[in-house]
Amino acid sequence: MSRSPTLIKGWSDVCVIGDEKVGKTAMIHLLTQGYYDINTKYEPTLEDSYILHVASSLSVDKIKLKLLDTAGSNISYHHKRLPRHFIDQCAGFIIMYSVDRLESFNIAKMLVQEIKSVRKENDCAIIVLGNKTDLIQYRCVSREDLQLLCNEENVYGDEVTVTDKSTFRAPLSHMVDDIFKCINEESERDIAKKRGVVHRKFSDLF
Ligand SMILES: Nc1nc2c(ncn2[C@@H]2O[C@H](COP(=O)(O)OP(=O)(O)OP(=O)(O)O)[C@@H](O)[C@H]2O)c(=O)[nH]1
Ligand SMILES: [Mg+2]
């Protein structure tokens, strides 16, 4: 097995995906710059990337994430699929929808299924975020809908709002810990392979 892209580059690519206008860019600005003005005029994203250093409960050092901001319009209107290089190479995926738009939730569900159909279990981190919980009167996707999706697909999910940075603390730390575990597993396999060690379960020996 070749070395993981993360180990070679020194950072982990995290793809931020979801329908257009769900708040992907707003979230990235909030996380990387510490603030986001909700009254900022909406500008559709083409493609961007941002570096974020995040602490993990599993490591002394911070983990370096490269957040890839994607264009929601690509997903919703054109091919309704993710570019294959994103699915193959990213260490993590933040799949976002907006709690005031059911279509965006259905797209999030489709994206989870698409990634899970390509990637092996436990070789990337996937979290689903329902954004814009501040729009209480417009909500049409419930927390239970999200919980159901998470149970069915065995992924972590949470609800957030860009108006409150603290809502991102738990999901982000979950994602970083998951990425850390994936990197460690990958490097252990790598080291073992170099030494010619074959991993076998204890029970296989008898
Ligand atoms: N009320 C409210 N508005 C939000 C929130 N997050 C984002 N917005 C607004 O929603 C609009 C779309 O946000 P963007 O971050 O540009 O959405 P996006 O997902 O990056 O959209 P694309 O780049 O087209 O894929 C902007 O006007 C934001 O200010 C939120 O938590 N609450
Ligand atoms: Mg954007």
Image (spheres, rainbow, N blue to C red):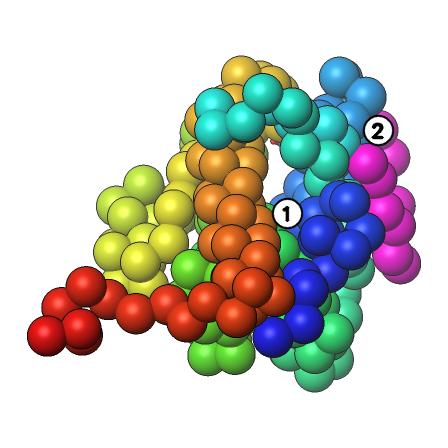
Q: Is mark 2 within 8 Å of ligand 1?
A: yes
Asked if one can make out residue 116 in the rendered structure from this viewpoint, the answer is: no
Which residue sits at x=75%, y=44%?
A: 11
Quadrant that contains the C terminus: bottom left
Task: Look at label 1 and name its amino acid.
Answer: Val
Instruction: Choose between 39 and 130: the one closer to the eye.
Output: 130
Instruction: Choose between 8 and 76: the one closer to the eye.
Output: 8
Q: Is mark 1 within 8 Å of ligand 1?
A: yes
Could you say which disc has been placed on residue 182 in the image? Answer: none
Does residue 42 sit above or below 61 in this rendering?
Answer: below
Which residue sits at x=72%, y=40%?
A: 65
Q: Secondary structure at mark 2?
A: loop
| Extreme-bottom residue of the structure | 79
Q: In terms of secondary structure, what is the magenta stretch mainly?
A: loop
Give the x, y percent position of residue 52: 75, 31
Instruction: Choose between 49 and 129: the one closer to the eye.
Output: 49
- Upstream in the sequence, badge 1 or badge 2? 1
Q: Residues within 10 Å of mark 1 (few under 14, many from 20)?
A: many
User: Which residue is the site of mark 2?
Assistant: 40
Bounds of the magenta segment: 38-51
Q: Residues within 10 Å of mark 2 (few under 14, many from 20)?
A: few
Does residue 78 sit above or below 99 in this rendering?
Answer: below
Q: Secondary structure at mark 1?
A: loop
State if disc 2 and disc 1 touch (CB < 8 Å).
no
Q: CA distance from mark 1 to mark 2?
A: 14 Å
- Looking at the rendered structure, the number of numbered marks drawn on it comes to 2
Give the x, y percent position of residue 15: 68, 55
Quadrant that contains the N terminus: bottom right
Give the x, y percent position of residue 50: 84, 39
Which residue sits at x=28%, y=48%?
A: 147
User: Which residue is the site of mark 1?
Assistant: 22
Task: Look at label 2 and name its amino acid.
Answer: Thr
